[in-house]
Image (tube, rainbow, N blue to C red):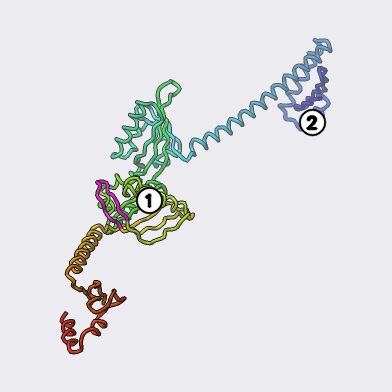
Amino acid sequence: MDQVMERGNVMTKKKSDSVEVANPSTDSKCSAQSHSPLHRLAEKKVKENETNIQEMLPPNEVSQLLHELRVHQIELEMQNDELRRVQEANEALRVRYFELYNLAPVGYLILSKQGMILEANLTAATLFGVDRAALVKKQITNFIYPEDQNIYYLHCKSLFEFGETKACELHMMKKNGTKFWVHLDTTVAQDVDNKPVYHVTLSDINERKLREEEIKKEKETAQLYLDIAGSMLLVLDVAGNISLVNKKGCEILDGKNDELIGMNWFDHFPPKEEKEKLKDVFVTLMRGEIKPSVEYVENLVISKKGNQKWIRWHNTIIKNTKGTIIGTLSSGEDITKHKQLEEELEKSKARLDLATEASKIGVWEHDLVNNTSIRNLIHDQIFGYNKMISEWGIKILFEHIIPEDRSSVQAAFDRA
């Protein structure tokens, strides 16, 4: 394939190994008016040199020499073009480096082993509120909050001992004394003289830390409200692990908050004979295959110390914003004493029934507040019934009292 190269008034046409050289003199006549005096002077000297060469050398050698000179000229021009392209590429790299290094979203520092700042990017200077030149040769500790100096000391100590990339979070200070949170990553490197240096990146995490503190305060406030509650409040995740428990819950379960968090409820707190059954029901519930069938349920719970306690539960399902089940929230009331009283009452009632049956005494008790009555079978049998009738109140009682005694009985009721 033919190649044509043109530079100024010189053109060469190359095909295989044959070369034809155009005479520049004809083209120069046409453009002489537009050339500068210096160009015309140079052109004149070139012609004189060509004339001298032509007089000194045979024609064929003159043509070859001119060809070689023009090839060399084109090579120089091509080298100039390549050099210009390399310079443009280097300039683009320089701009790219400036953007990546100085305009990076994090601060970059190079420190000496003694903690002196050797280099800093613009982002780091902006973080500290100073000019970049003002950072160089300053100790990094000048910008670390006094109360967090020990954090940085331990950070460097660990880095020096293990030589790995280390990270920490601490307070640093701006030039005006304002403190802010920084995430600091440090690696050990070597400079051009093979001396150890520290490469440090600084990330401004002040907003995240402030938000974390707000969330912590909100959580503490919520925990305070939970602890004031007189009932146990308990949150289980989908695996049945305790993720939240209030103060009352800790008292009932005989454990500290940090001890109870993370414990699996079904592995530790139900009676042994009920563990698997309750766990299966919970798993099915978490899958959404069933819904809670009752609002309240009473279960026996075994505390960490082995104490048995009756709890009346109110349970509800917890879902996230997508409607996915993520656990349960339960409020539990310790009804152990109530259960004990019920058991004592049942025992007393059983003993009373046994005594009344043995003595053939009819018993009837009427509550004047809620207008309810209890009685035994002998009572109804005394009034001529073979079995207990469905209802027995004051009205029915007066129907069974002879008229002349009703006033005295009514007076007794009135006094009561």
In the shown orientation, is residue 289 left or right of residue 11?
Answer: left
Q: Where does residue 39 sit, x and y in percent of width and height?
A: 73, 26
Does the magenta segment cover residue 309? yes
Q: Where does residue 73 sit, x and y in percent of width and height?
A: 72, 21
Indicate which disc residue 71 carries. none
Q: Mark 2 = which residue?
A: 31
Q: Are marks 1 and 2 in contact (CB under 8 Å)?
A: no
Camera-nearest residue between 415 and 117: 415
In the shown orientation, is residue 23 left or right of residue 304?
Answer: right
Most prominent secondary structure in the magenta stretch?
strand
Q: Residue at x 26, y 59 (%)?
A: 335
Q: Where does residue 33 sit, x and y in percent of width and height?
A: 78, 32
Which amino acid does the dot numbered 1 rest on? Leu
Q: Quadrant of the N terminus?
A: top right
Camera-nearest residue between 403 and 414: 403
Q: Look at the picture and state if 348 lies above or below 397.
A: above
Camera-nearest residue between 343 and 218: 343
* Residue segment shown in magenta: 299-311
Image quadrant where residue 148 sits: top left
Camera-nearest residue between 193 and 292: 292
10 Å crowding of disc 1: few (<14), some (14-19), many (20+): many
Image quadrant where residue 416 sits: bottom left
The residue at the far bottom in this view is: 404
In the shown orientation, is residue 167 left or right of residue 146?
Answer: right
Q: Look at the picture and state if 404 lies above or below 378.
A: below
Q: Mark 1 = which residue?
A: 236
